[in-house]
Image (cartoon, helix red, strand yellow):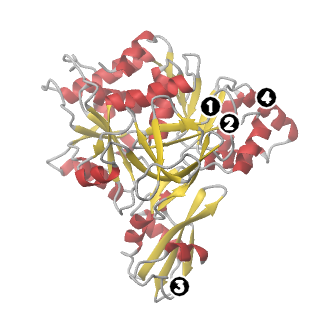
Amino acid sequence: MLQLVENAKSYSQEIAIIEKEKSFTYQNLLDRSKEIAGFLLKNKSDLSESPVAFMVSPGFDYVATQWGIWQAGGIAVPLCITYPLPSLQYVIEDTGATIILVGDEYEEILKNYKNDTTKILVKISQIAASDVAQLPEIDKSRGAMILYTSGTTSLPKGVLTTHSNIESQITTLVKAWEWTSDDYILEILPLHHVHGIINVLCCALWSGATVEFLNQFDAKEVFKIFLQGKLNVFMAVPTIYFKLIAEWEKLAEEEQKILHQAMANFRLMISGSAALPVSVMEKWKEISGHYLLERYGMTEIGMAVSNPYHGERRAGHIGQPLPGVQLRTVDEEGNEISKEEAGEIQIKGPSVFKEYWGKPEATAKSFTEDGWFKTGDIAVLEEGYYRILGRDSIDIIKSGGYKISALEIEEVLRKHPAIKDCGVVGIPNEEWGELVVAALVTGQNLDTDQLNTWIRERMPAYKTPRKYIFIQDLPRNTMGKVTKNELKQLF
């Protein structure tokens, strides 16, 4: 039984989703998702954990599609709506998805799959009401979703979570952050990441709350929605708070006062996916009356640590482990250390993912022999609150709420005919957390604007370096390995 869907039946006549001034009830969602499930099943009784990829704009159709895949017994594989074709192809081929569901606006980018006899490309708008066959019983141990995250290797890995994992991730947050059916939240986060899918969408819908979608972030539009007085919960990444502060500073004093009062009426505002600069936290407190709740999580574990809903929220700290989450810190040899020392965070609990899709070796390397997941994040406990010190791998860059693999970007850059070699690193930046920058070894003048255009045809825009330097050679150690700490100093 899918508890998320069962819960919706209790709120059938309540508003679940608001999209472009259209309202949809929980019953609308139940009806449409059942139609999609029926279409997917056709003459089958169960999709039996077959991956189903879908590229659908955030909103009613997105949720109905996700729920439909789950109810048919499939594994949902959300595709990022801003990715270029090579990135989409990688996810589709890596998961082995044979069915691809698309919104009308994305049919063109995936048109090559129309002629692929191994795939079925279907527009959501073409799925009509039909007599729905009996839906299968879904055991919680089944695979539910594959989300992609960049690890220390050059290629992203698919993180497989079960229905049980997802339910645990949701219920932990619903309890910790006191979600109720009276809540109303704005969804502005990407829906191919755990932050937008679990923390916002699933927690709200589990609780019978209302989700309003704003697909294209616009600071003015966000403030306009704030002023309507319906919202009482807001979640974003530090980059968004940075942009909202910049917009607020443009307003006249009277407009600032009105907006401050509107925000003061919220019950909860949260920041996550990247470290929140203390200066941004303090400024947001000044303009909104809210001390942002900062938390820590990963695609593989959901949310694991959080500042408290009630009680002190400490700037620069991620808080304490959430209920049901076991946390320990270990040294480089994997030995558990005293809480006051810096060490790698390791997590155990029902929220932790099942496996990396199709990568048993990578899965095995990510867990200790006694079942602890190795996060790769270094933290220290200070007066009861954990503080993240950084990554144990310098090849992971946290920028704008994304975890970006420097090695992946380097692989693409090296394919450019004018680039002999390159090194990509992240440098501290107040707005983005870290800025993606690249050092290039090239024998000719290179127009960086043209280079950026070239990169964006091959990778998502957020992975494009924001700054370049041109050097004769990359700094290396005696083993020939690029010394990235030295590279960072050059910026």
Q: Is residue 341 left or right of residue 422?
A: right
Image: 37 above or below 477: above
Disc 4 to disc 3, how far (Cα)? Answer: 52 Å
Disc 2 to disc 1, how far (Cα)? Answer: 6 Å
Q: Is residue 89 left or right of residue 261?
A: left
Nearer-N-terminus badge (4/3)? 4
Residue at 51%, 77% (x, y): give it.
439
Nearer-N-terminus badge (4/1)? 4
Q: Is residue 330 left or right of residue 279?
A: left
Q: Are marks 2 and 1 in contact (CB under 8 Å)?
A: yes
The amino acid at mark 1 is Pro
For label 4, the residue is: 261
For label 2, the residue is: 313
Classify mark 4: residues with Cα within 10 Å, few (<14), some (14-19) or many (20+).
some
Disc 4 to disc 1, how far (Cα)? Answer: 23 Å
The amino acid at mark 4 is Gln
Where residue 237 sits: x, y (%)?
A: 58, 45
Nearer-N-terminus badge (2/1)? 1
Q: Nearer the viewer, residue 241 or 342?
A: 342
Disc 4 secondary structure class: helix
- Res. 103 image quadrant: top left
For discs 4 and 2, the disc positioned in front in the rendered view: 2
Q: Quadrant of the C terminus?
A: bottom right
Disc 1 to disc 3, how far (Cα)? Answer: 47 Å
The amino acid at mark 3 is Ile
